[in-house]
Image (cartoon, rainbow, N blue to C red):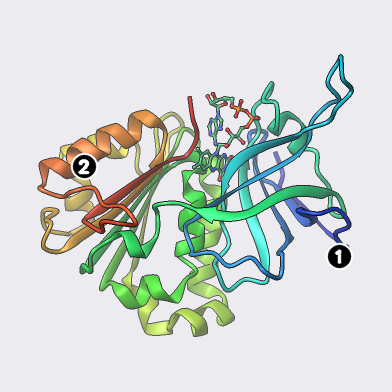
Amino acid sequence: MNQMTATAPATPILPDAQTVTSVTHWTDRLFSFRVTRPASLRFRSGEFVMIGLMGDPHPQTGKVKPLLRAYSIASPSWDEELEFYSIKVQDGPLTSRLQHIQPGDQIILRPKPVGTLVHDALLPGKRLWLFATGTGFAPFASLLRDPETFEAYDEIIMTHTCRDVAELEYGRQLIDSIRTDEMLGELLGEENLAKLTYYPTTTRETSAKMGRITDLLKSGEVQRDLGVDAISPNTDRAMICGSMGLNTDLKEILEGYGLEEGANSDPKHFVVEKAFVG
Ligand SMILES: Cc1cc2nc3c(=O)[nH]c(=O)nc-3n(C[C@H](O)[C@H](O)[C@H](O)COP(=O)(O)OP(=O)(O)OC[C@H]3O[C@@H](n4cnc5c(N)ncnc54)[C@H](O)[C@@H]3O)c2cc1C
């Protein structure tokens, strides 16, 4: 599918409602959109919020309740708008409708950001691994546009695994923009951009690098490709955002290297968040 982008300014009218300012369809399963940001909303890059639409009226009572789902904020904390990167689940209660939003439409946004994919949950380190599958790239789209990420580490390795090449496109363009956009370059620090390595892989469609990141790590292929030494709790920190299976497998791999899972209240070597439930 061709990318289609539409833009329009507008003003929110309902409490907790924000106005859609642009929508981009990446594939028939993926889209991203931007909305106005509530003036009072403060968040740490990497956190998620609940967003949604009003549901259908209850068949007996006629009452209408909001239909909300967790979404990582894909934009950095300094951005004046909020960006989200979304799946389209064919029969999904929310996304079967959300995928049709247009600039000027309203969505509900509960302004209570939370999450573990934040710098505060990690001890200081030298190398940061960001492991994503599918829409799990979203929190990293936020963190990769945050100057703190580049100031805190000597090296950042962003791995993204999808089934098909087209599903990598949102992430690929984001990485490109970090490397080529003058404003982002200035903000993140031109010399810092050399710290970023992007490692996309596909599991179904043929591409330059194929395979699950877990297999590529276990075989040592990632380390050989990137010319990095073995992962160690002395130097390496990691954030993981993918399916339950990926999260569990990666956690086991990192623990095998001696890394321990951290939390906001107890920062350690790596943190994990589900990209979705199910
Ligand atoms: C902490 C957290 C952060 C999240 N952030 C995002 C995000 O940034 N972007 C996003 O698209 N979704 C995200 N999700 C998932 C999101 O909350 C919804 O599940 C998703 O929007 C689908 O909603 P739905 O009502 O259409 O279907 P649901 O009833 O919620 O899901 C139906 C089924 O679709 C599959 N599914 C749901 N979400 C995904 C997904 N993202 N990728 C692949 N399969 C999926 C699962 O098998 C699920 O059982 C997040 C979930 C959690 C827990």
Q: Amino acid at mark 1?
A: Pro
Tell me if residue 177 comes above or below residue 222 in the rendering: below
Tell me if residue 235 comes above or below residue 110 in the rendering: below
The residue at 80%/38% (across/down) is: 100
| Location of residue 186 in the rendering, given as x and y in whole percent from the top left corner | 51, 85
Q: Is residue 213 left or right of residue 40?
A: left
In the image, which disc is placed on residue 9?
1
Is residue 220 visible in the rendered image? The answer is: no
The residue at 85%/53% (across/down) is: 14
Q: How packed is label 2: few (under 14 Cα within 10 Å), some, or many (20 or more)?
A: some
Q: Which of the 4 image quarters holds residue 266? A: bottom left
Which residue occupies the extreme top position in the image? Answer: 60
The residue at 54%/41% (across/down) is: 167
Locate ligand 1 by image quadrant: top right
| Location of residue 233 in the rendering, given as x and y in whole percent from the top left corner | 13, 57
Tell me if residue 84 comes above or below residue 151 in the rendering: above
In the image, which disc is placed on residue 217?
2
Query: Which quadrant of the rendered structure holds the N terminus?
Result: top right
The residue at 40%/74% (across/down) is: 148
Asked if labels 2 and 1 touch by Cβ distance under 8 angstroms, the answer is no
Q: Report helix, strand or loop for mark 1.
A: loop
